[in-house]
Image (cartoon, rainbow, N blue to C red):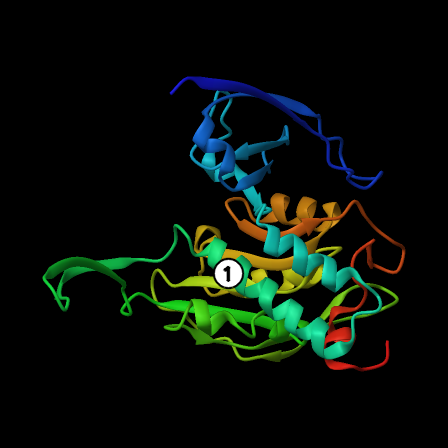
Amino acid sequence: MASSRVIFNLTLPFPSDAPPIPSTCHSLSLSHSSLFTTPKIVCSSAPRRTCGVVYSHMTMEEKLPAENRMLVYVPPHPLIKHWVSVLRNEQTPCPIFRNALAELGRLLMYEAARDWLPTVSGEIQSPLAVASVEFIDPREPLAIIPILRAGLALAEHASSVLPATKTYHLGISRNEETLQPTIYLNKLPEKFADGCKIFVVDPMLATGGTMVAALNLLKDRGVDNKHIKVISAVAAPPALQKLSEQFPGLHVYTGIIDPEVNEKGFIIPGLGDAGDRSYGTDP
């Protein structure tokens, strides 16, 4: 099949006080079938940080060193767009909001697990013949870490996608004046199993302080960035900037990237306080 040549030019609106990030234009060669694969945003923590949009299974003519880049995936699935829209609506009642967050989390988990789950091969007897099969290997360690409390809602349906996982709860609150995180609950083990793959779940990546605190706890326990995937409903440039600088090799899966964060640390347009809207509490 003949290949097409597509030019992408991406500019992310990072904060005015952040170091300048040049807009780069990557020339990409791809087959027509590749147009329907999942898009990624590539953020490099190298001295010359760049951002570009690439697609899975496509070859970039200018590749960044793998160890110096953070990948941000925004899957173009229509159901993901639908649930993000439901979450944005200020008229969405609490039970529907929480269910929408759980459904979005399930879809993002599915996308994040696509190339990450180890399998075992074998043969089984079907009603008609012997068939070659593959199953998820239950011996390989997987963990989910929801950041309380809104992370509980986003991870609520995770077990339907990843049944053989352990869940460790992490409670982190944010000071509304200083925007600094405080850890008030830590149920992480002192050490994770070798090679354990971990999903860290938090709906809002705004300033990035909460996620940085969580990832530092994993770093203290010897977890490599390449063994971590972050799941969020909405992300903003300040958080992505901070994560790309401190955690090269990290993968982030989010429903959408919004343009800015206001002076109170809320993503704009965002979807409000995900915790309050999930559990019906007053802001």
Identify the residue at image location x=35%, y=60%.
195
* Relative height, residue 137 to residue 38 (above, below): below
| Residue 24, image x, y percentages | 65, 23
| Residue 265, image x, y percentages | 83, 59
Quadrant in the picture for the C terminus: bottom right
Q: In which quarter of the image is residue 191?
A: bottom left
| Residue 46, image x, y percentages | 58, 33
**Could you tell whether 106 is left or right of 19 in the image?**
left
Q: Of residues 97 and 197, which is closer to you in this image? A: 97
* Relative height, residue 109 to residue 172 (above, below): above
Q: Name the residue under label 1.
A: 109
Quadrant in the picture for the N terminus: top left
| Residue 192, image x, y percentages | 40, 69
Q: Quadrant of residue 93?
A: bottom right
**Could you tell whether 30 is left or right of 261 in the image?**
left
Q: How many labels does the image show?
A: 1
Identify the residue at image location x=70%, y=25%.
23
Most distant residue in the front direction? 128
**Could you tell whether 90 is left or right of 166 in the image?**
right
**Mark 1 residue element:** helix
Q: Is residue 172 visible?
A: no
Q: Of residues 247 and 61, which is closer to you in this image? A: 61
Q: Which amino acid does label 1 sit on?
A: Met
- Determine crowd level at label 1: few under 14, some 14-19, many 20+ residues with C-alpha closer than 10 A: many
Identify the residue at image location x=41%, y=17%.
2
Q: Of residues 148 and 242, which is closer to you in this image? A: 148
